[in-house]
Image (spheres, helix red, strand yellow):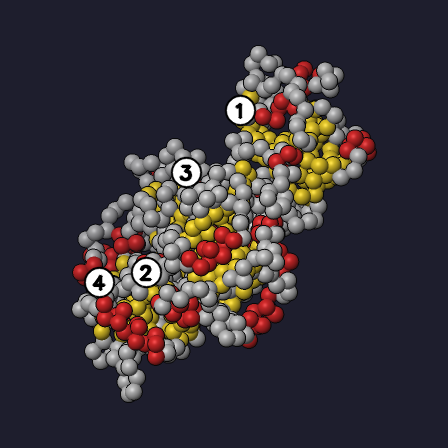
Amino acid sequence: MPAKLKVYKEKRNFSITPEPSAAGTRSRGGLAFVIQKHWASHLHYDFRIELNGVMKSWAVPKGPSLDPKDKRMAVHVEDHPISYNSFEGQIPAKQYGAGKVIIWDKGSWHPLGDPVKQYHNGHLKFELHGHKLHGRWALIRMKSNGVRKEAWLLIKETDDYARAASDYSVLDAEPDSVAATTALDAAQIKSQSKRGRMPRGALKAALPQYLAPQLATLAEVAPADNNAWSYEIKFDGYRLLTRVTEKTLHLYTRNGNDWTGKLSKLAAALAKMKLPPGWYDGEIVILDAQGIPSFQGLQQAFDSAATQEIIYYLFDLPFCDGYDLRKVPLSERRQLLQALFTQKTPASVRFSENFDVAPKDIVASVCGMGLEGVIGKRKDSPYVTRRSADWIKLKCTRRQEFVIGGYTDPKGARVGIGSLLLGVHDEEGKLRYAGNVGTGFDQRSLTALEQRLRDIATDHKPFDGPTGRYHNPHWVRPILLAEISFAEWTRDGNIRHAVFHGLRSDKPPRAIVKEKAMHLIARQQTVATTAKSVKVTHGERIIDDSSGIAKIDLIRYYSLVAPLIGEHLKARPTSLVRAPDGISGELFFQKHLGDIDMPGVRQLSPALDPGHAPLLEIAKPEGLLSAAQMNVIEFHTWNALKTSIMKPDRMTFDLDPGDKTDWPTVQQAALLLRSLLQQLELESMIKTSGGKGLHVVVPLRKQYGWDTVKDFSHAIVEHMAATLPDRFTAKSGPRNRSGKIFVDYLRNGFGATTVAAWSARARPGLGVSVPFAWNELDKVTSGAHWSLANVGTRLHKGNTPWDAHPVAPQNITHGMKILGFDPQASHTELKR
């Protein structure tokens, strides 16, 4: 032993360094491995495995990858003592390996063959059972070529734990220490539950009192990597979670309401199964005569307190028998859950089976049967208590919940009600009318619904904005939710061919918004391609509760669009909008860097803005990601380049609609503005704002100063407001904008900024400002037409709409003359 650690001890002064000097004792219950993240002269990862009483060690500069195509260089270094496995801390300056060390991963390893023989032969195969790394791996020694230190390759072998680098980077997704996490030794891994082996990654933990369920994200199409996903029926029912202890069993809705009393028969059936303590996730349904889930039948069962026919489909097991299984891959959680079902399991409790066929075939089959759709789940995904893109919904028809805001009287022989008036909340939380539904009711539901609506009647219209033309509608307090299927959304935001399926009581009305399908391309990108040096912390933190978007999603988005947004940020002073507590918290507008370190963000010359702190520039793609790591969501740019700061090279108009202005009016306003600019012999480009309105951009020759350009833009807006006063206003403020559009010209002043194309916005849903062509305007449905959830569908076009029809920098002198604007007479022009 002393000989094996000789080199290790010779390199260290243990009176200075906190590193361990003792050899340590062999691990109990198996061989240990540890990976230590080491910020020495260069960041690297030290991979160590226990063999022959020491830790055989390799320095891996780029860290491990879950992609079998990535062959990561691993430099063989001196043996370390087993006691080094628990070392975290700071190695002092001027000591060997000076820098910070954390335990990035730890666990046990299992050799696949004779490890001593394989090690000496330079081809070591093994399995890892860690917190982050699992499955089969290989270490392969390369030919020496006279190199002093042995060079090996660390390679992930193809198995259920492998993932493409373009899809996932474990280094970016899980950057932090696991030192405080319960160790996974072989004894724990082999620990038997009452029903079977606990899978790898299971952690000893107390059963939490409450658990929020994982929610699925609506998707347009199934992902391309079919083998990585499994599919289940999307049940037309209520989500239900079961908490089992040694003495109690309770049933909870997704909002945490205790329904044990309402479902006493089901609770008794579950109790007969004698399930291990844990949390069980599933869906309750009522089956019709054809065995198809009926949401209306489920609603009627609750209305009549006849819930004995309810079927409970279980599909996940986040906690079981004293273990937290949330980090265990989905496929293994489901194997453990399925093992709990026997021939004696009550017929009212069933396991939700997988369909291992192509998703397009599954969707076609379930739609043909009259089912709602399918749920796709990534096989290796953890269980997270929020909405996630690792679970997706593929629906046969468009279907979602709506808030009931009123109803109409019946006509002809019909009794009860005529139709329900429906709404969804917009990005500002206002309830907007979304159409009506008059079909899907039976006589029983019409009568019951009429009474419930009468009980919540009100004289106040609950909708903001227009509600269609109805004769004497009856308004109700917006507290009831209706499950509706429909054919499509119209351009004015209403649904067509709607069918009523029943009422819901398991979701809060304020949470009901227009559900938008996500294109999976954006979600599946990683920061690995452009952000290898950016350390992501707290990537799992949700920054937008309405969509479930996490910090890592935003960072991956900016990694993906860095080449696109870079064209709009290049050489321009840029301001940042930071949201340290997410978009629902306080926002900070930042013009200067201060003491914050953001690699890739550069301070410009103080001479550009004398008397103030230096302005900022996003100098490299890395700057986007380091800014997003510091909780920046929005990027705003000046209308001038840093090389000619006093001469704007563009003029920007922000069409900002008032509260009572509908979207077609905004579209028409943009066309009117374009027409006026063309009369002034000026061409323009257009983009969404990512918020409520549109931005019209006019490229300029660097000819006039800020005040001339600003005054000219003001004159244009004044002309529009004077010509069409019922549509436009040149004054800001809610009172002036009511039912009108404020064309904001103030963005053309010195120091003013406009959100950059491809920047996300700190608003619910995280809308994105996207450039488009004028002939696409009629297809754009709002200022947030594209958001982080669906912008992947637009990335293939990128900046092409502007690049394909470029607008050259223009001389505005002639336009001034046409409008009758005299720059020399402008009293605000400053001689800078």
Q: Earlier in the sequence, mark 3 or mark 2?
A: 2
Which of these two is toward me, 307 or 488? 307
- Cα gap from disc 4 to disc 2, whole angstroms: 29 Å
Q: Earlier in the sequence, mark 4 or mark 2?
A: 2
- Cα gap from disc 3 to disc 1, whole angstroms: 33 Å
Q: Amino acid at mark 4?
A: Arg
In this view, the mark in front (4 or 2):
2
Q: Which residue is mark 1?
A: 89
Q: Could you tell me which quadrant the N terminus lies in?
A: top right
Quadrant of the rendered structure where residue 130 is?
top right
Q: Residues within 10 Å of mark 4 (few under 14, many from 20)?
A: many
- Kindly state the secondary structure of the residue where label 4 is placed: helix
View extreme (top): residue: 15
Q: Which residue is mark 2?
A: 509
Q: Which residue is mark 4?
A: 737
- Kindly state the secondary structure of the residue where label 1 is placed: strand
